[in-house]
Image: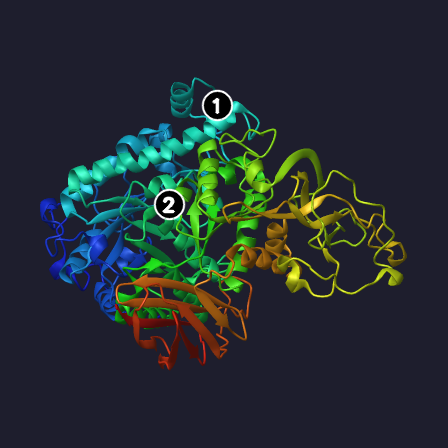
């Protein structure tokens, strides 16, 4: 039985409610409480996502109490799009059930205004009911047989239609005239994904006018029409962002923003044509719809997502991240509570990346009320420590370069495996090695303030982007490049050689070994049963082929670890080979470049009597290194150990990647960590000190939404390098559990110990300038 308070249609807050059609606030008076816009004032947001049953049951007073308990500064309120939550007068804007009797949007808005909260009107403009489709079929997407695309029980709206150009802007104007919300948020605003091609009359006409081409007939990355269609769709979404903001700002004032919600995963952004880098240049704030962890990612991935968005938005602008307090696991249950441990680990990693929190519940009445207290506890802590969680910049040694065109044009239909897996493999190693890093967009390389750039299978690169990498290296920066980096131009066309061949110390050939695709687990299939041979430092590129060799795995061939092995391979111990099983484009090494690993071809796995190396040695390079005249170090890893490290989690692959990073850094890591278990670390500088986030990376469930407990561990010994010569440390304090910490200062390093890490810790180091 539900015990959550309910209310009649009159509502408990009707004394503050707006009469339908009567402006709550004049648009010109918005922001009168402060000279700063709402997105500068707000530190925490909340959202009760109204459902069709809520007009008859919403208890506004109950939610006002929850607003106060969680200390939020603004709320999202369902407004319109698929259905109106106010009595709209616009033809085609269907009212949600009960709205004719109760103006739910106006009532909640008035209550929020009475409590001093900003109000963001939530839109959902990506589909419509059948009656709307019947009245306006020209608003909706159709296939090549002119049949409408369905999304569940509804119909998919087309971004080329007047639904987006006239109907939705009319809704904005009506809502602003009546209620003057502070801003608009739009869910699903980008329309159908790229798996479906719309052949409606609007798309035929607009695509033809923009490109001079006809719509593609199928997904084909080698078809110029399909590539033009991809570009056109990206441009249309960016145009919609600008168009909607022109309407809302024109009617509601300069701070009445329209904000399309953005996804955290590059794959999801690409699927719906959201160019997050381009959109970030057009907004002072981002609403991040990245509510939970995903199947092949850990909690630490949340920090990476927020840092990646700050890279293109700026660290002086807010990223508000929506977090599901309902069970958004695999599978999802909208009305059950997410386990407290899952929420805390996910949300605290968002804070570690620079996110401002935003709680999210589905519907206004819940029989599982545990989700309410979870929000109170977490938001109360954030409110008490918000000063150390904002107004800061990251301290990093490494920049990992990312690119959405690389996902599209290099990844094609295999983007998550071809492009995202190498990136994720390297960032995971950076996390486990406690090397502070920041994602860097490929067009921002010239602004990178790091010691090492990592280019994970960054195949798609323009000449200008390649020149930015050269300038970075000429200035003394080191690079680590993997896979097909710079093999394709900005349009995805193959180059005869790497554009960065002069830096990589390697040249392309047409040959390849293995496959990018995941290997089969069957031991009967051995086409991926390959290895990598570790070479000593004397093995440099020559024009001579490698000598024939007997099976070096035989007992008589066993020997001690080679003396003089390169430091990159130092963590591998007493072995001359490691497992591979991945993909290797065959390259030739430039003279003088050191080849540290070579390829050993596949041989049978089963039956065991057949499992021996037929060709134990080749001259096919798998890992190459060299040092530039100016001191820069260059690592090129054609073998896809980064992809394999993410996909198969081979420890030796991670060790090689860690060795590459440590060698390129030459000790330039501002953080030292000794921990009995993996810990995620993110370090920031702010006025008067430093902020260090520690995140617990022990999992009790790899299934998203199912982490039911937190496993504490410790002690963790930490040292942070001070960035200002002569600055004095005045205090070191853990703001979650640790409290005041004993510390020592030696040179420019401050050292301390956290005895026990639960979900997370935030260490505040207060310093005084010399």
Query: Dot 2 surroundings within 10 Å: few (below 14), some, or many (20 or more)?
Result: few
Residue 496 visible in the shown view: yes
- 458 vs 648, nearest the viewer: 458
- 391 vs 34, nearest the viewer: 391
Residue 3 visible in the shown view: no
> Who comes first in sequence, dot 1 or dot 2?
1
Q: Residue at x 38, y 19 (%)?
A: 209
The residue tagged with tag 1: helix, strand or loop? loop
Instruction: Pinpoint residue 600: horizontal percent, then vertical percent.
Output: 77, 49
Q: Residue at x 21, y 40 (%)?
A: 248
Q: Nearer the viewer, mark 1 or mark 2?
A: 2
Q: Is residue 553 left or right of residue 587?
A: right
Picture quadrant where residue 393 is located: bottom left
Instruction: Pinpoint residue 370: horizontal percent, then vertical percent.
Output: 38, 72
Report the Cα–Cα distance between label 1 and label 2: 38 Å
Single out the residue that lies furthest toward the front.
629
Q: Residue at x 75, y 63 (%)?
A: 561
Count of numbered marks: 2
Task: Name the quadrant of the C terminus.
Answer: bottom left
Task: Name the quadrant of the N terminus.
Answer: bottom left
Instruction: Pinpoint residue 717: horizontal percent, then vertical percent.
Output: 47, 76
Compared to 25, does 672 lie above or below? below
| Display coloring | rainbow
Q: Which residue is mark 1?
A: 215
Q: Which residue is mark 2?
A: 447
Picture quadrant where residue 377 is located: bottom left
Instruction: Pinpoint residue 578: horizontal percent, then vertical percent.
Output: 72, 57
- 598 vs 527, nearest the viewer: 598
- 215 vs 761, nearest the viewer: 761
The residue tagged with tag 2: helix, strand or loop? helix
Picture quadrant where residue 385 is located: bottom left
């Amino acid at each position: 039985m539900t015990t959550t308070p309910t209310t009649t249609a009159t509502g408990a807050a009707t004394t503050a409610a707006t009469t339908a059609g009567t402006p709550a606030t004049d648009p010109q008076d918005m922001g009168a409480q402060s000279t700063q816009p709402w997105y500068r004032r707000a530190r925490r947001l909340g959202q009760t996502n109204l459902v069709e049953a809520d007009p008859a049951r919403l208890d506004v007073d109950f939610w006002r109490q929850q607003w106060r308990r969680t200390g939020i500064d603004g709320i999202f309120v369902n407004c319109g799009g698929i259905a109106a939550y106010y009595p709209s007068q616009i033809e085609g804007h269907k009212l949600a059930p009960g709205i004719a009797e109760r103006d739910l949007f106006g009532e909640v808005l008035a209550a929020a205004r009475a409590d001093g909260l900003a109000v963001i009107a939530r839109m959902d403009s990506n589909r419509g009911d059948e009656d709307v489709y019947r009245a306006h079929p020209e608003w909706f997407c159709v296939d090549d047989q002119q049949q409408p695309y369905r999304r569940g029980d509804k119909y998919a709206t087309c971004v080329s239609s007047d639904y987006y150009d006239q109907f939705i802007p009319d809704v904005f104007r009506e809502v602003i005239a009546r209620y003057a919300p502070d801003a608009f948020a739009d869910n699903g605003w980008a329309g159908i994904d790229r798996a479906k091609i719309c052949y409606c009359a609007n798309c035929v006409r607009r695509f033809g006018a923009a490109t001079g081409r006809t719509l593609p007939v199928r997904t084909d990355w080698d078809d110029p029409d399909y590539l033009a269609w991809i570009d056109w769709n990206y441009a249309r979404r960016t145009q919609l962002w600008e168009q909607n903001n022109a309407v809302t700002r024109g009617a509601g004032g300069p701070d009445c923003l329209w904000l399309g919600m953005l996804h955290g995963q590059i794959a999801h952004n690409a699927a719906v044509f959201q160019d997050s880098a381009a959109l970030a240049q057009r907004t002072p704030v981002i609403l991040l719809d990245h509510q939970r962890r995903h199947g092949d990612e850990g909690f630490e991935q949340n920090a990476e997502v927020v840092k990646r968005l700050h890279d293109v938005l700026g660290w002086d602008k807010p990223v508000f991240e929506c977090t599901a307090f309902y069970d958004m696991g695999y599978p999802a249950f909208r009305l059950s509570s997410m386990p407290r441990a899952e929420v805390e680990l996910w949300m605290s990693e968002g804070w570690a990346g620079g996110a401002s929190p935003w709680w999210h519940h589905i519907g206004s009445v819940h029989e599982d009320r545990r989700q309410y207290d979870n929000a109170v506890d977490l938001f109360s802590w954030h409110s008490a420590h918000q000063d150390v969680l904002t107004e800061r910049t990251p301290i990093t040694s490494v920049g990992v370069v990312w690119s959405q065109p690389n996902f599209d044009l290099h990844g094609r239909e295999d983007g998550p495996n071809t492009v995202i897996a190498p990136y994720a493999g390297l960032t995971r190693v950076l996390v486990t090695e406690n090397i502070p890093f920041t994602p860097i967009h490929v067009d921002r390389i010239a602004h990178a303030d790091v010691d090492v750039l990592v280019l994970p299978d960054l195949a798609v690169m323009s000449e200008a982007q390649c020149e930015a990498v050269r300038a970075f290296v000429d200035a003394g920066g080191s690079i680590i490049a993997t896979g097909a980096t710079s093999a394709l131009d900005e349009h995805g066309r193959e180059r005869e050689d790497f554009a960065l061949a002069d830096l990589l110390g390697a040249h392309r050939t047409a040959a390849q070994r293995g496959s990018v695709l995941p290997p089969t687990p069957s031991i009967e299939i051995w086409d991926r049963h390959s290895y990598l041979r570790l070479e000593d430092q004397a093995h440099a590129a020559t024009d001579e082929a490698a000598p024939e060799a007997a099976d070096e795995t035989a007992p008589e061939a066993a020997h001690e670890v080679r003396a003089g092995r390169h430091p990159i391979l130092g963590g591998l111990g007493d072995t001359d080979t490691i497992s591979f099983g991945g993909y290797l484009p065959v390259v030739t090494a430039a003279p003088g470049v050191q080849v540290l690993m070579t390829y050993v071809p596949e041989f049978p796995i089963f039956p065991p009597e057949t499992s021996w190396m037929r060709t134990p040695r080749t001259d096919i390079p798998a890992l190459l290194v060299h040092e530039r005249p100016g001191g820069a170090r260059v690592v090129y890893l054609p073998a896809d150990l980064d992809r394999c490290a993410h996909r198969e989690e081979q420890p030796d692959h991670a060790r090689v990647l860690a060795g590459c990073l440590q060698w390129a850094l030459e000790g330039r890591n501002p953080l030292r960590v000794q921990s009995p278990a993996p810990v995620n670390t993110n370090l920031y500088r702010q006025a008067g000190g430093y902020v260090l986030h520690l995140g617990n990376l022990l999992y009790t469930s790899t299934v998203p939404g199912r982490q039911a407990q937190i496993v504490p561990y410790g002690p963790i010994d930490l040292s942070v390098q001070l960035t200002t010569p002569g600055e004095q440390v005045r205090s070191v304090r853990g703001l979650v559990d640790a409290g005041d910490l004993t510390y020592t200062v030696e040179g420019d390093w401050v050292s301390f110990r956290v005895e026990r890490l639960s979900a997370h810790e935030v260490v505040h180091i207060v310093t005084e300038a010399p």
